[in-house]
Image (tube, rainbow, N blue to C red):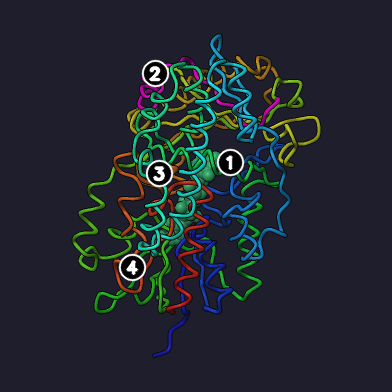
Amino acid sequence: MSVDYDVIVIGAGNAGLAAAATLQRGGQRTLLVERHNVPGGAATSFVRGRFEFEVSLHQLGGMGGPGPLREILDEMDVTRRLRLIQDDELYRTVVPGVLDVTLPADWQGAVEVLDNHYPGNRAALTRFLGIVREVGLWQLTARANLHRLKEQTEWLSGLSDVRRYGLRTFREVLDEFFTDERLKFVLSSYWSYNGQLPSRMSFMDMARLLALFIETKPYQIVGGSQALSSAMLESFLEAGGEVRFNTSVDKIVTRGGRAVGVRLDDGETVSCRLVVSNAPSSTTYTRLLDPADVPAGVLRDLGSRRMGPSATALYLGLDAPAAELGFSTATNFLTADLDERTVARGMRSLEPAPFLLASCYDVRPTGFAPPGASQVNLVTIQYADPWEAVPVRDYQQAKAAYAASLLDLLKAIAPGVRDVIEEAEIATPVTFKRYLSQPGGAIYGFDQDAMDSWLFHEDDLKPNVPGLVLVSNWVTAGGYNSTIVTAARLSRRLLAVL
Ligand SMILES: Cc1cc2nc3c(=O)[nH]c(=O)nc-3n(C[C@H](O)[C@H](O)[C@H](O)COP(=O)(O)OP(=O)(O)OC[C@H]3O[C@@H](n4cnc5c(N)ncnc54)[C@H](O)[C@@H]3O)c2cc1C
């Protein structure tokens, strides 16, 4: 029986774009359906006044050296369409009055800087970062090869540090190697890239982040994540793919329990041999599908998962150059004190922000701000609950108060920012829930702590309903690398069986 398309991809976020481009370039006639008017999902930008604001990308890893993302984007013919800028530094970490440390994106350099700040730790640092590297590089490869479980197990038998440390929490392993809380704090700075505090995050997940950015270097993209999304779309269209924007998929059509097409919001039904959903897994299995078509085990597993954190972001267009404001490093982590419990409380309350990531896109200009001006995004990790409890009439005031607290914390590195604000926009978990259609406004999918990591959910990527696969940060780790690399590799494997 003839079908309209070989493949229909629901959603043009990172994962949907990577899947669509890979499948179309592999010879499958593919239709991409996106409810918004631009590609990217969270990987996008918006314009206010003279500024174009990056929504979500802070540092892009995986692009230098043997980077997994670089390999995928090369294969998709996307890299040549991008202009990349390498960051000089990994990050700057500041606790006002307690510590101010800038780490280079280099294993030995990181040992030198930390040993200078906290003498007597050189041997422990060398051993610790060696383990981080081994575990991190294993993680980056293992995630891509879940379908080769036998080889993975054999490989793992030779990696004693991965077996010994991988599933412990990052905090436990830090405690085994170091006593100085400040040193441990600096090494934990990337916790917000996974949304789990060091006492909850698995060592292997933190090791993956550190290895990704140190080994393959942090990059910025000229034009930001929207340039990346547009480049992936361009590659898809050049290969003959078709896209429909401003179009939602209302239902995945099934026949005899098999996905055979989609129903669009205007009532049109389009048929295909394979549906790829970039929508969240709970939405796909319980709203787009009739749950009767979904195996009971999959629904049970969904019910056992916890919604991951969202974020509150203050986007600032500043009428002054970055250096004049005090920004020497693109990526800056600021925290009120060393106590993890302070940050944990802040994630579930509207108390003054105890933590923020300040990204300055003009230390080396990425083209977002006009000459002489700069863009700075302040992001803190929060769950949606405290914001959803705010009555509508108090919402604007709550946003203004929270923004003021972010600016207060920022004073430690850039005291003059308030005086040069030209544009300011604040997005809360409620905003991300509405614009990104993500349950709980979650920015990385499900909560992935050491007890519930990707390693325990390898079924997520399997076709649990015949004719349907899922690609998004709900079935892999959050972030640019995971979503793009996993979706492209899965699609490559699908090409072999389609
Ligand atoms: C504020 C913020 C900061 C972040 N910081 C970083 C960072 O520094 N580094 C990092 O690596 N990651 C970061 N992330 C996370 C990263 O952006 C996400 O993990 C990633 O972009 C998710 O991609 P995705 O393809 O899974 O989903 P999405 O980007 O959510 O894309 C899903 C797409 O599907 C579409 N869609 C859904 N349902 C339908 C339907 N029924 N019909 C049609 N279309 C549909 C949506 O409109 C959307 O375009 C951040 C995210 C946010 C929001």
Q: CA distance from mark 2 to mark 4?
A: 41 Å
Q: Secondary structure at mark 1?
A: helix
Compared across the picture, whether 292 is left or right of 443 comes to: left
Compared across the picture, whether 267 is left or right of 377 comes to: left
* Residue assigned mark 2: 342
* Residue assigned mark 1: 213
Q: Relative to 89, does residue 283 appear above or below in the rendering?
A: below
Q: Residues within 10 Å of mark 4 (few under 14, many from 20)?
A: few
Quadrant location, the C terminus: bottom left
Which label sits on residue 463? 4
**Which numbered disc, 1 or 2, marks the residue that appears first in the sequence?**
1
Q: Amino acid at mark 3?
A: Val
Q: CA distance from mark 4 to mark 3?
A: 29 Å
Which mark is in front, 4 or 3? 3
Query: In which image quadrant can residue 257 be found?
Result: bottom left
Taking the spot 66% from the left edge, 19% from the top edge, the residue there is 417
Q: Amino acid at mark 1?
A: Phe
Label 3 lies in ligand 1 vicinity (Cβ under 8 Å): no
Which mark is in front, 1 or 2? 1
Q: Residues within 10 Å of mark 3 (few under 14, many from 20)?
A: many
- Name the spot of residue 10 as percent of width and height, x first: 45, 64
Please report the bounds of the magenta region as a residue range.
328-350
Q: Amino acid at mark 2?
A: Thr
Q: Amino acid at mark 4?
A: Pro
